[in-house]
Image: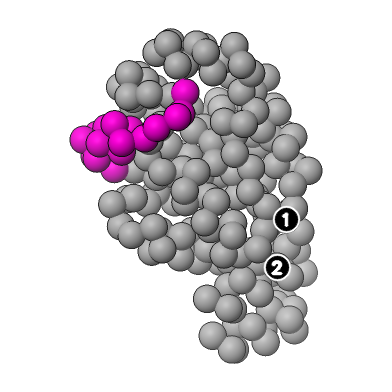
Amino acid sequence: MAWRISILQVATTNLVAVVMGPCGVGKSAVAAEAARRMGGGFVEADDHHTAHAKARMAAGDALTDDARMPWLDRVGEAARQAERPTIVACSALKRQYRDRLRHVLGSVLFVHLTAPRQVIAERLAARRGHFAGAELLDSQLATLEPLGPDEAGITLDVRAPLASVCETVLDFMAAQAVANFKQDDGGATSNVIRQHMQGR
């Protein structure tokens, strides 16, 4: 664990990962806990919805693409200004939504959380105090566009324990940080990275 945290803290100043998926899949829990473990920034995309948008979703009315774009811009800007490395909890269901985040942030890693519909529905039924209810689940699952082969990301089943999912997220981010660092310095791994890799 320590070697990954050290790499994430010293190998890059521009690493952003977006934990994505439908409502109720566990984006906020995974993103917040992974960010806490690595000592980086955390951005909750739900905090950047307008009151009007939250009211619409609370009524079971899914937002249109046009309504989502300004929100994605706000989320991207919040992530751009957050402490690095940064993990964002954001549905990012469609390719065009992820492209919008990439437009604001540049390179972005995506962690797509998945689970059977029944598992997500049970989590939503147990959730209290959130504007996005179970009535939005089917529309979000229908809207969801899985990561394309050209998108930097991984897909994780959230039926695994939270700690295990977070470990995989941090492994993925650390591996990408090392790859980025090698590319930036022409293929030579820095002394700092080499020392941490030897200490695994």
Is 75 on the left-hand or right-hand side of 57?
A: right
Q: Residue at x 75, y 84 (%)?
A: 191
Determine contact: label 1, label 2, CB under 8 Å: no
In the picture shown, does residue 63 fall above or below 29?
above
Q: CA distance from mark 1 to mark 2?
A: 8 Å
Q: Which residue is mark 1?
A: 84
For residue 186, what is the image quadrant?
bottom right
Q: Residue at x 52, y 63 (%)?
A: 170
Q: Residue at x 70, y 68 (%)?
A: 9
Query: For the residue marked with disc 1, what is the amino acid?
Result: Arg
* Residue 129 within the segment the image draws in magenta: yes
Per the rendered image, the range of residues in magenta is: 115-131
Q: Earlier in the sequence, mark 1 or mark 2?
A: 2
Q: Can residue 110 be seen in the rendering of this structure?
A: no
Residue 55: x %, y % from top left: 52, 13
* Residue 43 within the segment the image draws in magenta: no
For residue 160, what is the image quadrant?
bottom left
* SS for dot 1: loop
Q: Which of the labelled discs sits on residue 9, or is there none?
A: 2
Is 3 on the left-hand or right-hand side of 186?
A: left
* SS for dot 2: helix
